[in-house]
Image: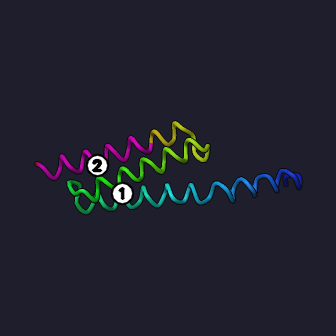
């Protein structure tokens, strides 16, 4: 059990970081859904851009590690590109 001050600090940081992390997760999920529905649509493009932005913001604020954000952005872009290639062929 952490000391009282450490617990309070952790609670404050958690409270401040939760909405940023939640926004990033929600936008990534929305982007994946848009890609699965129609990867060539403008909606999918916009959703992926919004997810990239949310992850970059989370990384800049230290909510997620910058390499973690970069990895998730890369995976999202790869998912979009593969879905487009599968649809074209």
Which residue: 56% across, 55% down?
A: 21
Horizontal relation, residue 42 to residue 57: left or right: left
Residue 80 shown left or right of residue 12 in the figure = left
Residue 84 in the magenta stretch? The answer is yes
Mark 2, other Cα within 10 Å: few <14 / some 14–19 / many ≥20: many
Separation (CA) of disc 1 from disc 2: 9 Å
Q: Position of residue 36 (x, y in %)?
A: 28, 59
Q: Nearer the viewer, residue 56 or 74?
A: 56
How far across and down, in percent of the image, does residue 42 sit? Answer: 24, 56
Image vertical order of residue 74 relative to residue 16, above or below:
above
In the picture, measured across the screen, residue 78 lies left or right of residue 38, that is right
Is 12 or 85 nearer to us in this picture? 12
Residue carrying label 1: 31
| Rendering quarter of residue 14 | bottom right
Which residue is disc 2 drawn over? 80
Q: Main secondary structure of the magenta part?
A: helix
Which residue lies at the image location 55% right of the left edge and 43% below the top edge? 59
Way the structure is coloured = rainbow
Q: Which residues are magenta?
A: 72-88
Which quadrant holds residue 64? top right
Residue 13's disc is: none
């Amino acid at each position: 059990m952490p000391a009282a001050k450490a617990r309070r600090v952790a609670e404050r940081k958690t409270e401040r970081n939760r909405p940023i992390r939640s926004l990033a997760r929600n936008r990534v999920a929305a982007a994946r859904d848009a890609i699965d529905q129609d990867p060539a649509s403008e909606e999918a493009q916009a959703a992926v851009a919004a997810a990239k932005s949310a992850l970059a913001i989370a990384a800049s604020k230290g909510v997620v590690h910058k390499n973690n954000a970069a990895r998730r952005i890369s995976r999202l872009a790869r998912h979009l590109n593969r879905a487009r290639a599968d649809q074209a062929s």
